[in-house]
Image (cartoon, rainbow, N blue to C red):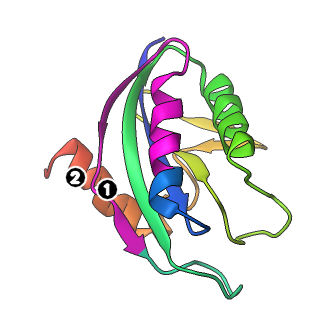
Amino acid sequence: MIDLAYIGLGSNVGDRSAFLARGRAALAELPETVFLTASSIEETEPLGEIPQEKYLNQMVVVETALSPQDLMSHLLEIEAREGRARDVRWGPRTLDLDIVRLEWQTVDEPDLHVPHLELPNRAFWQRELTELRGAP
């Protein structure tokens, strides 16, 4: 099944803009996937209680024939290539990639929820979705 995937990108370590750019480039290279468009980049405060730098956030839309599980596996591989460490929950990240929503599918599995469970709590994701999908 071909679907539209809305993928959130975030970075708050090092050259944040460069990490986002490499993330977008890697997404454009995914198999069975076409990069469509990207939202504006927004600087946001970090979530959680760990002291850290501000994030740059952006959302992209890709058209993909990958299953949500395969897409998530690719996202985790991209994060790892960019030095993402998963040692502290809600900690600093070189590159964070999340499937925020899919246009035609939902997923409710132990390791993957689409739409992302935090979507209602992240105003920047809501703004980016509105920008990408157009105002109602």
The residue singled out by tag 2 in the image is 131
Name the quadrant containing residue 43: bottom left
Residues tagged 1 and 2 counted as in contact (Cβ below 8 A): yes
Tell me residue 82's x, y (percent).
67, 46
What is the magenta range? 20-43
Q: Residue flagged by tag 2: what amino acid is it? A: Glu
Q: Nearer the viewer, residue 53 or 135?
A: 53
Tell me residue 53's x, y (percent).
57, 81
Is residue 26 magenta-colored?
yes
Compared with 120, 113 (above or below) is above
User: In the image, 92: left or right of 11?
Assistant: right
Camera sees residue 103: no
Q: Secondary structure at mark 2?
A: helix
Write the residue at 64% across / 59% down: 94
Write the residue at 63% across / 37% down: 75
Q: Nearer the viewer, residue 136 or 16?
A: 16
User: In the image, 126: left or right of 77?
Assistant: left
